[in-house]
Image (tube, rainbow, N blue to C red):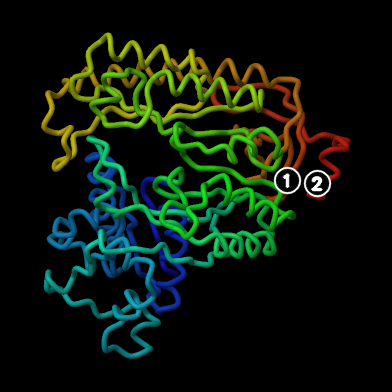
Amino acid sequence: MTVSVINFGCRLNSYEGEVIKQQAQEAGLEGAIIFNSCAVTSEAERQVRQAIRKSRKENPNAKIIVTGCSAQINPQQYAEMEEVDKVIGNQEKLEAKSYSSLRGAVGDAAIQTGLLHFVRNDEEKVLVNDIMSVKETASHLVTSFEGRARAFVQVQNGCDHRCTFCIIPYGRGNSRSAPMGDIVAQVRKLVEVGYKEVVLTGVDISDYGKDLPGQPTLGQMMRRLLALVPELPRLRLSSIDAVEVDEDLYRLIAEEPRLMPHIHISLQAGDDMVLKRMKRRHSRQDILDFCTRVRSLRPDVVFGADIIAGFPTESEEMFANTLRLVPEAGLTYLHVFPYSSRPGTPAARMPQVPKAIRKERASRLREAGDKQLEHYLQSQIGKTAQLIVEKERTGRTEHFTVVELDRDCEPGSVVEVEIVDAGDSSLRGALATKPSPAFAMTGT
């Protein structure tokens, strides 16, 4: 039996889930089920609790551990669940001692059969510290990502900003960055074991480096990374804040083909009054200017965006401004969710938009996103693309578009395909019989 880690939420959780699994397995917690929770919305937390209860019914003898942002922010709600054996904070979940201490005074035979001793006193069930006291982002060398063709590298954690709808800083702490040398070492190791694409991830990676000596920017770190690991074929960014993009990153967008032409924007809204009440750092025009500038540097770039529908006080006119921004900025991949009130946040005390209206607006945004995606997919027919194979017959292009292949390929490999058709949300491709000279030169 192996440790099972169930990740909810962001890409950073996916990365940290691999660290958790590695630490727990080394501690001998075979058979344990670990829920790496998300707290971005109340619905996300409800899904975690539901999954825990279901898991207990299906695995009555398993030891269940809960960690992640929701566990950090409100550990008591999980400590009070009879299905849960241990609650671990966001910092503690990455530390080996947190798992070795769970073995308790039991013999190796009991450990091997999964019969671990967990105390049930609620106070002892909780291992959660003050996340605001954490000052560093520790480097964790992860060389295997189960079921993934690409690898994730954590470059930053926490957030110094306090958006009125967001509880995440209280689950992650203040912004802190991983040293550039540690990032380079980890990416180099990942390339050595066969990964051809690396995704840089964090809570607010646009803030990278402000806490490090010399205050290197995200773009400066990426320039050094690509220079020191020339054998890395593909580098990708997770979500960024458009107004925080530095000049070095703009240069990379223009000049570095190994940086993938897919940028996901932490947008949230497209109306200036809503953005102000959210305490976001950008305006509507900032987003339009950003997209225009990036397209002038990299014409084939594709944008994604996170958008909240029905934020408190949002009128139909305000919503219309957000809806119009989707085609105006040329956003292709939308991550839309109706506003979910979080107790303890300023937005929860603002006049709320009725839930039915929030859902209806979210539906309209998704329809706008579907139209944008359909237009983009149709534009790709007849073109060639390089993709990372995720499963035998599916992969993703440089633009993160899903492609269904006409024959089996080795997961993790990079192949060149000719796009022959488009579906509702993906492309269909045929393996190129003769790869282009540029593709052959990559050595992939």
Please tell me which of labels 2 and 1 falls first in the chain: 1
**Residue drawn at point x = 61 percent, y = 23 percent:** 295
Quadrant in the rendering for residue 301: top right
Instruction: Give the residue type at disc 2.
Output: Thr
Q: Position of residue 123 (x, y in %)?
A: 12, 71
Give the label on residue 29, or none. Answer: none
Give the label on residue 442, or none. Answer: 2
Q: Position of residue 435 (x, y in %)?
A: 85, 37
Determine whether label 2 and label 1 are within 8 Å by CB. yes
Q: Position of residue 386 (x, y in %)?
A: 73, 37
Classify residue 408 as left or right of residue 189.
right
Disc 2 is placed on an element classified as loop
Distance of mark 2 from mark 1, alpha carbons?
10 Å
**Residue drawn at point x = 26 percent, y = 55 percent:** 52
**Residue drawn at point x = 40 percent, y = 82 percent:** 112
Q: Is residue 132 above or below residue 51?
A: below
Instruction: Give the residue type at disc 1.
Output: Val
Classify residue 162 as left or right of residue 411.
left
Disc 1 is placed on an element classified as strand
Q: Is residue 39 above or below residue 324?
A: below
Q: 428 and 407: which one is in front? A: 428
Q: Position of residue 429 (x, y in %)?
A: 72, 30
Q: Nearer the viewer, mark 2 or mark 1?
A: 2
Quadrant in the rendering for residue 161: top left
Q: 138 and 180: which one is in front? A: 180
Give the label on residue 414, or none. Answer: 1
Indicate the quadrant containing the N terminus: top left, top right, bottom left or bottom right: bottom left
**Residue drawn at point x = 26 percent, y = 19 percent:** 273
